[in-house]
Image (cartoon, rainbow, N blue to C red):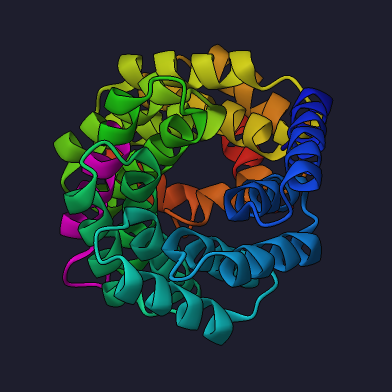
Amino acid sequence: MQTQTDQASYDIAIQHYNRAITLKPTYAQAYNYRGIAYSHKGEIDRAIEDFSTAIRRKENYAEAYSNRGGAYRLKGEYDRSIEDCNTAIRLDPDLPEAYNNRGIVYKLKGEIDRAIEDYSTAIALNPNYTYAYYNRGVAYCHRHDDISIAEDLNRAIENFNKVIELNPNYLRAYSAASDTHYELGTYYYAEGNDDLAIKNYTKAIQLNPNPRLYNNRGNVYAQKGKYDLAINDYNEAIKVESDLAEALYDAVSYYNRGMAFLHLQEWEKAKEDLTTARDKQENIIIQQFRKEYESVAEFEQTHNVKLPEDIAALLTSP
């Protein structure tokens, strides 16, 4: 999201380029850079007009073709965007921005392999190209199928980590890396690889702690029978759930912690948490309990335990 400060800096830049164009109307670079400023401001048609003028003013202006390709992409005119990027690459095969711009369009068109190939070329031309690493990471996140999901998600993480290494202030990379570790952790959890699930959830929490991550890691600990560690995670989830947007996870967290206390046979704590979960969301206990057990009797038989009647009542559909 652009701030007022960003907008003001683009306006000042445009004023400088206006003066340069007034002094020298044939100054192609001024049109190109003013077009970039207009593009950042979201004034895409004015940006395209400036890039086109720059192309007319300077023969074989590869950078302006690449920039116009990026502007056409923002308008959703993907074929024109690719055409301009192709022209830029033909004029200057060593221009990494043109490959990156074309890669973005291929990704938007669902041609993920071609996008990754273009990002890789951009990176080969400029090994410090953070935006291309980020884009390649996003592409790997979208490419995976049932066979290569873990491999592609790990590749995505490698790219996001490279972005963070090159530019520690690139905040989107932290969020993207966290989300990818979460997805990878969920994959490993579904595959029954609890240790790798915990490892990835832990990394995700380090990058961007949130209730969902604590809850998921807590669930893995609970599945492994490490209920004290699970409770610690549910405690953290409850601690950071403070606004209405997190109300669902809030109820789930109390349910999960209550079930962990149940396994430890800490009946009063279990009853308190399950009651809180029910008060926060009326049907949450039945919904969650029925995902794992058909009945209280099945729970008792599976875990060789006899539940107190008041707790059994909480877990029974009214």
User: At 55% across and 48% down in the image, what residue appears?
Assistant: 288
Principal secondary structure, stretch drawn in magenta: helix
**From the viewer's perspective, is residue 317 above or below residue 11?**
below
Asked which quadrant contains residue 265, the reply is top left
Q: Is residue 220 visible?
A: yes
Asked which quadrant contains residue 243, the reply is top right
Q: Is residue 278 visible?
A: no
The N terminus: image quadrant: top right
- Tell me if residue 153 is in the magenta stretch: yes
Q: Could you say which is closer to the camera, residue 237 or residue 263?
A: 237
**From the viewer's perspective, is residue 196 above or below residue 51?**
above
**From the viewer's perspective, is residue 167 above or below residue 128?**
above
User: Which segment did they paint magenta?
Assistant: 144-161
On the image, the x and y values in percent for residue 111 come to 37, 80
**Residue farthest bottom in this picture:** 79
**Left of 94 or right of it: where is 211?**
right
**Left of 97 or right of it: where is 6?**
right
Q: Could you say which is closer to the camera, residue 2 or residue 227?
A: 2
User: At 17% across and 67% down in the image, what residue appears?
Assistant: 148
User: At 61% across and 65% down in the image, what residue appears?
Assistant: 57
On the image, the x and y values in percent for residue 160 come to 32, 39
**From the viewer's perspective, is residue 211 above or below residue 130?**
above
On the image, the x and y values in percent for residue 149 come to 23, 62
User: At 17% across and 38% down in the image, what residue appears?
Assistant: 196
